[in-house]
Image (cartoon, rainbow, N blue to C red):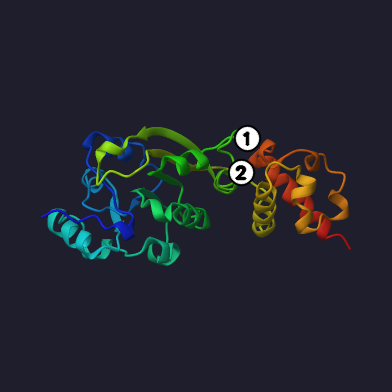
Amino acid sequence: MDVRAKKHLGQHFLTDQNIARNIVDSLSFEGYKKVLEVGPGMGVLTKFLLEKDSEIYVAEIDNESIDYLKKHYPKLEEQHFVGDFLKTDISTVFGEELAVIGNFPYNISSQILFKIIDNFQFIPEMSGMFQKEVAERTAGKPRTKDYGILSVLVQAYYDVEYLFTVHENVFNPPPKVKSGVIRMTRNLKEGLAGNEVLFKQIVKAGFGQRRKKMSNALKVLGIPENMKSHPFLDIRAEELSVADFIAFANKWKSGLELP
């Protein structure tokens, strides 16, 4: 018996086996032993994950899906079901590096991405499917319409690749929008340590009024004296790279720390 898709859980079950295999194969499976699948549903990705030489865990809150997975994929042991991904303490449950993968529920896409970057020290790699718009925004580059808060906050920790688009007709039930598959690989950017809060405030304020120059958009934060002649204030947020934002936030912080 198949699992009934539940609208309140944002469930749209992928039915194309080739796409499922391609998503799984987009992970490198290098440098970690464990893989956590978020929202496995009826196991279209799980099937291919279990062929890999990795420990597979699943985060699922739908009891009907859990029963289905236990029946059809007995290789998934009881302790490999971890419940709600957003409530899972990654450091406690796993305590080591792992990859994350999934055909992610559209209604919690941003929350999933922020959960991943909050645990970036444990998650070196992520591959998965999101609503196409979210995937494009996550992978967005400066001076494009897709580039914004989500792009900068994610790319401060991960290099993001947009892999391919998935059409509505390969899901049951079909969503109303196209989907996009991305891969995120933890990057080696440095310099944010201890300055994450200010960095996020600057990014959010800058893009909050994205048509205005940074000098106007950041007034709400109270621009410190050491920053008032900074050249970045004379351009818009969408023109700054992720590295620019990091350097700008660190310069801002250094002014706040002056005696």
Q: What kind of residue is marked 1?
A: Pro
Mark 1 burial class by Cα count in 10 Å: few <14, some 14-19, many 20+:
some
Q: Which one is nearer the viewer's eye here, 142 or 93?
A: 142
Which x, y percent locates residue 113?
47, 52
Give the mark nearer the N terminus: 1 vs 2: 1
Front disc: 1 or 2: 1
Residue that mark 2 sits on: 189
Specify whether 227 is left or right of 243: right
As helix, strand or loop, the secondary structure at mark 1 comes to loop
Q: Quadrant of residue 146?
A: top right
Q: Quadrant of residue 231?
A: top right
| Residue positioned most to the front | 176
Q: Which mark is residue 202?
A: none
Comparing 162 with 15, the one in front is 15
User: Residue 51's x, y, as percent?
Assistant: 22, 43
Q: Left or right of 256: which side holds 197?
A: left
Between 97 and 3, the one lying in front of the other is 3
- For the point 23% across and 37% down, the residue is 16
Q: Residue at x 46, y 41 (%)?
A: 133
Crowding near the residue tagged with mark 2, few <14, some 14–19, many ≥20 C-alpha atoms within 10 Å? some
> Marks 1 and 2, Cα distance to the nearest angstrom?
17 Å
**Residue visible at 40% across and 38% down?**
180
Mark 2 falls on what kind of element? Answer: loop
- Say what amino acid the circle numbered 2 marks: Lys
Number of on-image labels? 2
Q: Is residue 214 above or below residue 201?
A: above
> Looking at the figure, which quarter contains the C terminus?
bottom right
Work out whether 159 lies above or below 223: above
Provide the residue designation for mark 1. Answer: 142
Query: Where is residue 47 shown, x and y percent of the image?
Result: 21, 46
Q: Are marks 1 and 2 in contact (CB under 8 Å)?
A: no
